[in-house]
Image: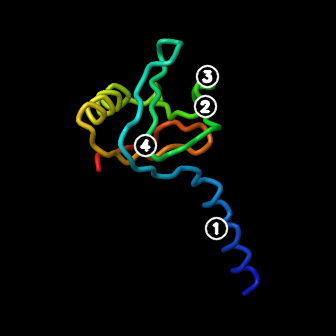
Amino acid sequence: MGEMKYLLVLVLSLISSVSAADWHQGKLEYVGVGYDGKTITFSQVGVSRNSCTCYPAWPTRNCLDRSRDSFDQEYAFLLSAKARGVSVSVNVDETTCKVIGMFEK
C-alpha cells in the first residue's frame, strides 16, 4: 500500500506542475500590436495580471504565440470578438501569458 501511495503522490505532483494554464472569460478590453511590430497583445475586462513575460513592455497583457499554426486565425478571432463586443474564453500559460486556446462564449 505504501508504494501505491507514493506513486499516486508522484503522479499528482507531475500533473499539477504541468498544468500551468487556466481559462479566463470576459470581453476584450484591448487588442494591440506591440512596439516591436510583431507581438499581438490583448487584455480582458475583469482579468488582471502584472507579471506576464510574453511581452515585457506590457506585463499586464496576454500575447498570441506567433509560432502557432493558427496565429492568423487567432488574431482575426480577437479582432472580430472585440468589434462585436462578445465575451471570449481564453486559455493562457499562467507564467508567460501566451495563448494556448480560445473560444467565443
User: Going from the N terminus, do you reach mark 4 or mark 1 first?
Assistant: 1
Q: Calculate the distance from the C-alpha at mark 4 to the C-alpha at mark 2.
A: 16 Å
**Amino acid type, residue under disc 2 in the picture:** Pro
In the picture of the structure, the residue carrying the numbered disc 3 is 57
Instruction: Indicate the secondary structure of the residue bearing disc 4.
Output: loop
- Tell me the number on the disc at residue 59: 2
Instruction: Indicate the secondary structure of the residue bearing disc 2.
Output: loop
CB atoms of marks 1 and 2 within 8 Å: no
**Amino acid type, residue under disc 1 in the picture:** Leu
Q: Nearer the viewer, mark 3 or mark 4?
A: 4
CB atoms of marks 4 and 2 within 8 Å: no
- Tell me the number on the disc at residue 96: none
User: Going from the N terminus, do you reach mark 3 or mark 4 first?
Assistant: 4
Q: Nearer the viewer, mark 1 or mark 2?
A: 2
Q: Nearer the viewer, mark 4 or mark 2?
A: 4
Q: Is residue 82 left or right of residue 19?
A: left
Q: Is residue 10 left or right of residue 104?
A: right
In the picture of the structure, the residue carrying the numbered disc 4 is 45
**Amino acid type, residue under disc 3 in the picture:** Ala
Query: Of all residues shown, which one is farthest toward the right?
Result: 2
CB atoms of marks 3 and 4 within 8 Å: no
CB atoms of marks 3 and 1 within 8 Å: no
Q: Position of residue 34 (x, y in %)?
A: 50, 18
